[in-house]
Every structure is written in C-alpha cells, then in structure tokens.
Image (cartoon, coloured by chain):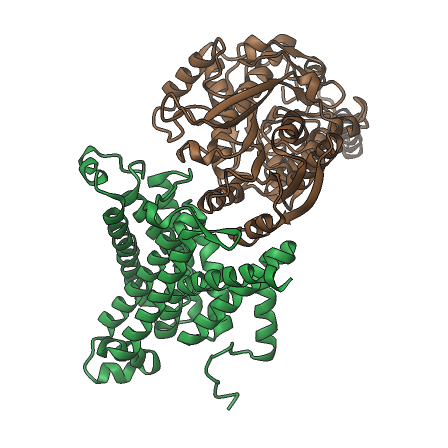
Chain colours: A brown, B green
C-alpha cells in the first residue's frame, strides 16, 4: 500500500482551486438564484402575504381563506407534480414597509416558490419590488390601483382584481346619463385612492361630466361630517368615492346616518364583500363595482359557495365574496400552471401565464378572462351593483345591475406598463 | 361665506363635545392616579362591543336564550346597552387597576408599559371572541336618520350624542364638586397620604376611580359606536385624541379638558371642510402651538419651577 505524500502548499493550492471553481459555479456571473435539481419531491411552498392587522385586516383574512381553500383542494387531489403544497403566511399589516420585510424573509429564509396576496396597493407594490429583485412570481390577488398593472407593473407580478379604472369605466357612462353631470370626487389620500380618482376623473370628463370639486381624505379619517356638509353645500348630482377599508366603513356609516345615501347619487368604485358583510343591504349604498357575487346565476357558483361553507363552517363571513373569490381563483390558476409546465421555474410559469385565457364557465363569470401579456393584468368581467331592496336571504345584499365585457372597459393605465425584459428578470426556482 | 361657515362651526362644537366625552375617563384616571392609561382605547372598544351584544341579534352571542330579550323594543335595549357596555369596561378596568398596584410609586414607565400591554391583550381577546369583522350598533329610530338644518341635512344621532356628552360632562362635574365622594376623589388627587390619614381606604378609592374612569371610556365607546363603527382596533382612534385633549387642556383640569375638546373639535371640523388634507394633522398642530407657549396646557397647574 502506497502513501501519497502531500505538501502543505500543494494542499492549499488544491483547496483554493476547488473553492474558486465551486464558488464560480454557484454565484455568478449568471443571473440565477438557487438553481437546484428540477425534479424533487419536496413540497411546493407558497408564501401568503395577507393582512391580519391594519386598515385591511378583515379583507386580508378573507383572501387568505380563498388562497388556502385552493391549496387545500389541490392537496386533497394529491398535490401538484406529485408534490404536496405547503403555505407559509405572514401578516403584512397593511403596511408597505412590513410588506417589503415579509417578502424578503419569505424568499431568502423561507425559500418559498411563489408569493401571493395583497389588498392595499402600496403594500402590493412593495412586495412586488422585492419579488422582481429575486425573480419570484408574485400574484397580487386583490389590490386594484390602476398603477399596479400600469407604471408599477413587473414581469413577475400578475394582478387578479379589476383595476379602479375598470370599475370607473363600467360605472361612469351610466351614472352621467342617469344621475347628472355635476360630479364631486372624494378619495383616500394614498396610492390606490389617488390613482383611482385620477382614472375616475379622466373617465368622467370623457363622458362629459363637470368635476365640481375633489377632496383628498387622509387615511385614518374617522369623522366625515365636515366633508359631508361640504358635499351638501356643493349640491352635486353624483359623488364618486374612491375610499377603502375602515375609512370606507366609517364614511358609509356616517353617510347613511345623515340620510345622504339616496341623494346625491354615490358611485363607490368597488365594494369589497368583507367591508359590507354583517351590516345588511343598507350598507351597500350607491352604485358600485365588483368582480363576483355569490348569487350570480351561473354554473359552479353554488358549488363554490357550498365548498367554502364546508371548509369554513364557523367564520362570520358565511358566504364568499369578491375578495375570497379573487384569492381562490388566482391560487387555483397558479397551481394549474405549475402542473401544466411541470416545473416551478419562474420563466416557464411567467410565459405560460402571459396571454392565458380562462373560460367564463371555469371562472364563474359572464365573459372569458385573459391575462394581458403586456401588463399582466387579468382582463375580466366587471359587475355593477347596488343595495338589494328585495333580498332572497340575509346574505343577499347586492342587486347586480349589469356586467361589462372586459374589452369594453380595458384600463388605459395598463398602457403605461413597461415590463422588465425576460433577460433582466433573474431566474428563480426553489426546486 | 360666513353663512357657509355656520354649519361647520356647529358641527365643530358637536364634535368637540364628543372629543371631551372621549377624554373624561382618561382625565379622571390621570388626574387622580397619575397613571397614563394607554388601555383607555381598548376599554372604549370593550364598551362598544358590550353595547353591540345588547342591541344587535348578530352581536356575537346568538344564543337562543337571548331571543326574548331581542324581541324587546329598541329603546329599552339601548338603555340597557348604555349600562352594560360601560359596566363591562368598568369591571375590566378594575381588574387592570389590581394589576397596576405593583407599579405605584415606581418609575411611571412601568404603568405605561403595563397599560399598553393590557391594551394589546384586550384587543386580541376582542378579536378572539368577536373576530375582526365589522359590527354595527343599531340605534332606536328616534335618534337615527337625518335632521333638517336649513337647506342641509345633519345627523340626528350626532345631535343626540352631543347633548348626551354635555349631560355627562355636567353630571361628572356635579359629582366631583357637589358630592362627598367627589370631594374624596379630588382630595386623593391632591394628597393621597392625607386622604389615607383621614381614614379612607386608598386601595378601594383607587380601584373605584379606575373602574369609574374605565366605565366612562365604555360610555364613550357606546356613544361613538354608531358614528365610527365597531372593530377591534377602533380604540386606537379614541386614545390618541383623548391624549391630545388632556395634554392640551392641562393634565388634571376638568374644564381644561372640556375646552380643549371643543377647541380640537372646531379646529378639526374647519380644517376638514376647507383644508381636508390637513384635517388629521390639525389637532397635533394645535397641540404644538399651545404647548410651545404654555407647556402645562390651557388650564394645567403651574409647576414649582414656574412659580
């Protein structure tokens, strides 16, 4: 038996050489993040970025029920690619700073494959910036600022809710001819409110409205009496409000309390189901938009409601609304695409999603939906509704007035989107 | 222009009375016990939830045995809600006072931290029992709806709430100044050792004062619930203006708190009408302005250093 004698210098040279070669293979210069073997039986991990506190706590939990329901359904069928789906949830606190921190942690420490969840546009934007930095595919499930699929769009981000401009387009023309031309605009003074108000103003002006005044309301306003007096003094035909979350609830309560919910006419950009549920049909005042309603007369709707009730028998929101629906549909589509492309590789997923058409029947809406490849915004049916004076039961708050074809209400803000190139987007696959 | 201003001034006075109502319990506790009760907002919320249970069949306790109660007319249920909400807040407040005893005489920071922790605990307990969804406190139709005011409509409930707040302010003043119990409480605020030397049980006095202050927070919660709505975090909206009103009015001063409440109400109402972007900031700017020139607030007592 022979012994190979190795000098200290020789050993150091070998070690250094191996280190450099190994380091080069792992760290660069190519734009890759954690490329492991594609075939794996480890679970697919999804990072859920839903609010549980702050202005949108209630809606955040509603969309969480939707995303988790889709994940549970896939797991019951054996998972995806033969792999179990796991989710990890962190409270984004309706706060962009927290959104950034949570997204960073989800990607770098939890090693999630995908991110999903958002109500507030500022938080969604913060999460998507982190996701784009790493190349992690992110589904913005419920935040609807026109900028989310406009100037703040990203290659990795897909926006599943209708935008404020979609809702304005759906409502404006009808409102001007029915109620009058003198409009008073009220909006929350943050990214969603500002951009939705800009979109409303543009749409209203296009259809001949006269904008009498516009008032920016600070987020967290609890007393609306002065603004409501000001509106009365201005005597508008229509008040178009882009106010969300708890602020909207307080505003609605005070409008109703003053008896101003009948005149002037109120156009509320979008009415999220968790903001209304439990308060009765009176809470659904004015005319407003939504992407879905549990009494749509379409196949699959009642089955979906039943499945939700079986999965969440004790939740106070006893029927799903638009927020839960968006969360569910988005997550379901993500998992389907993973199955179809046979991989969790971000580029394969992104390319499969771009331009993807989803049938109306499958989505339980009136028109087919498509993911716009230029903005990553889901172009879908928008419903106009008002409070239901003749409800079927104690959950039947909305009366659906009309539904719009996605082509007729396409948001012009989407045109300002400039997606990063594929090359500029890091490849990302957690294996 | 002046004609346009009148409704906003009246609205400001109504709002100011509500701010003063918010601050009453806070003022009593800080004045008598020198404890900054950061759980004031949570106790406010508890009062509101207590009232919801007594008013709304969907108030989180849909037990069948409550059904005959819910069949009662709205007015008696509302009166009961006005008792049960504050009672609930008062009892929890008394429990909090027992926990606070170990902090008396120690660094005030301990009391501050304890009440802050208690606020978080109470909020989470509320979330655990009622969930994070919104509740609505229905009111009797006699005090609901719009009130014709010239060619404007104003909320009937706000008129009622402002009158109620005025009555509460008056009753509290009478209690503190015209009854022997009030005299003991005031004496306790000035010199607690002397009160003890006169044979009063200081422990019981502090317990009752804290409970009373907490119950006043609960009263404010019941009154504000139909205006602000009922959510687990609604107390945060209450504790901050209450704190501003107390500091602005001068710690421990009854009429200071009332006049500061009115000032804050009028300033907030006018800025919300004419400079809406500044409406939330306006109360802090007012505080900054007053404290810059008069550090003890509008009616606070001069310190030894100032004499």
Q: Which quadrant of the view contains residue B5?
A: bottom right
Task: Give x and y (percent) for residue A186.
Answer: 62, 44
Task: Give x and y (percent) for residue B83.
Answer: 25, 55
Residue B170 visible, this orientation: yes
Quadrant for the N terminus of chain B in the image:
bottom right
Compared with B62, B3 (above or below) is below
Task: Give x and y (percent) for residue A429.
Answer: 66, 21
Name the residue: 65% across, 16% down.
A405
Name the residue: 59% across, 48% down.
A231
Task: Give x and y (percent) for residue A411.
Answer: 72, 26
Compared with B79, A62 (above or below) is above
Name the residue: 51% across, 53% down.
A223
Q: Which quadrant of the view contains residue A143?
A: top right
Residue B39 visible, this orientation: no
Point out the residue furthest to the bottom here.
B307
Q: Would residue B186 appear left or right of B269 to someone viewing this image? A: left
Name the residue: 55% across, 18% down.
A329
């Amino acid at each position: 038996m022979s012994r190979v004698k190795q000098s200290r210098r020789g050993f150091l040279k070998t070690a250094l050489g191996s280190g450099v070669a190994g380091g080069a293979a792992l760290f660069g210069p190519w734009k890759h993040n954690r490329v492991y073997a594609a075939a794996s039986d480890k679970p697919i991990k999804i990072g859920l970025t839903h609010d549980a506190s702050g202005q949108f706590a209630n809606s955040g939990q509603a969309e969480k029920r939707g995303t988790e329901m889709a994940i549970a359904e896939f797991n019951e069928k054996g998972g995806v690619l033969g792999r179990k789906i796991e989710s990890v949830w962190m409270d984004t606190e309706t706060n962009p700073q927290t959104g950034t921190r949570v997204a960073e942690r989800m990607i770098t420490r939890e090693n999630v494959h995908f991110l999903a969840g958002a109500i507030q546009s500022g938080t969604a934007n913060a999460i998507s910036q982190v996701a784009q930095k790493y190349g992690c595919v992110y589904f913005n499930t419920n935040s609807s600022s026109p900028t989310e699929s406009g100037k703040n769009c990203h290659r990795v981000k897909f926006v599943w809710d209708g935008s404020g401009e979609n809702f304005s387009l759906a409502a404006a023309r009808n409102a001007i001819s029915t109620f009058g031309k003198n409009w008073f605009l009220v909006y929350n003074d943050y990214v969603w409110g500002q951009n939705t108000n800009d979109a409303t103003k543009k749409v209203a002006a296009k259809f001949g409205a006269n904008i009498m005044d516009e008032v920016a309301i600070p987020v967290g306003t609890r007393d609306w009496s002065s603004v409501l007096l000001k509106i009365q003094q201005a005597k508008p035909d229509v008040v178009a409000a882009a106010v969300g979350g708890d602020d909207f609830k307080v505003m609605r309560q005070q409008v109703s309390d003053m008896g101003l919910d009948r005149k002037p006419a109120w156009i509320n950009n979008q009415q999220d189901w968790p903001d209304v549920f439990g308060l009765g049909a009176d809470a659904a005042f004015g005319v407003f938009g939504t992407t879905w309603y549990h009494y749509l007369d379409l196949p699959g709707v009642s089955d979906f409601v039943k499945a939700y009730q079986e999965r969440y028998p004790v939740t106070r929101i006893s029927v799903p609304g638009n927020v839960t629906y968006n969360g569910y549909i988005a997550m379901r589509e993500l998992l389907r695409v993973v199955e179809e492309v046979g991989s969790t590789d971000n580029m394969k997923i992104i390319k499969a999603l771009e331009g993807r058409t989803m049938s109306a029947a499958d989505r339980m809406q009136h028109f087919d939906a498509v993911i716009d490849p230029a903005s990553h915004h889901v172009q879908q049916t928008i419903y106009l509704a008002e409070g239901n004076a003749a409800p079927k039961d104690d959950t039947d708050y909305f009366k659906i007035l009309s539904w719009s074809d996605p082509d007729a209400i396409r948001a012009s803000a989407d045109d300002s989107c400039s997606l990063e190139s594929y090359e500029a987007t890091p490849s990302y696959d957690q294996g | 222009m002046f004609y346009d201003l009148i409704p906003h001034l009246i609205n400001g006075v109504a709002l100011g009375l509500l701010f003063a109502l918010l601050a009453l319990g806070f003022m009593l506790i800080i004045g008598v016990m020198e404890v900054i009760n950061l759980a004031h907002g949570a106790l406010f919320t508890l009062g509101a939830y207590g009232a919801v249970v007594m008013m709304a069949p969907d108030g989180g306790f849909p037990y069948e045995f409550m059904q005959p109660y819910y069949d009662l007319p709205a007015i008696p249920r509302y009166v009961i809600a006005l008792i049960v909400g504050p009672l609930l807040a008062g009892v929890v407040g008394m429990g909090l006072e027992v926990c606070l005893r170990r902090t008396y005489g120690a660094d005030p920071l301990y009391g501050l931290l304890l009440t802050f922790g208690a606020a978080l605990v109470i909020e989470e307990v509320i979330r655990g029992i009622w969930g994070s969804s919104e509740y609505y406190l229905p009111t009797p139709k006699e005090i609901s709806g719009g009130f014709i005011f010239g060619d404007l409509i104003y909320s009937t409930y706000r008129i009622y709430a402002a009158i109620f707040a005025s009555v509460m302010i008056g009753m509290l003043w009478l209690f503190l100044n015209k009854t022997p119990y009030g005299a003991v409480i005031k004496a306790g605020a000035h010199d607690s050792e002397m009160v003890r030397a006169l044979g009063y049980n200081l422990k019981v006095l502090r317990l009752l004062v804290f409970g009373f202050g907490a119950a006043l927070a609960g009263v404010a919660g019941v009154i504000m619930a139909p205006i602000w709505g009922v959510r687990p975090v609604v107390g945060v909206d209450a504790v901050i203006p209450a704190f501003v009103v107390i500091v602005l009015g001068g710690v421990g001063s009854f009429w200071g708190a009332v006049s500061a409440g009115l000032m804050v109400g009028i300033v907030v109402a006018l800025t919300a009408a004419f400079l809406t972007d500044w409406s939330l900031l306006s109360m802090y700017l007012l505080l900054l302005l007053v404290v810059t020139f008069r550090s003890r607030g509008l009616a606070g007592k001069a310190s030894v250093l100032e004499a």
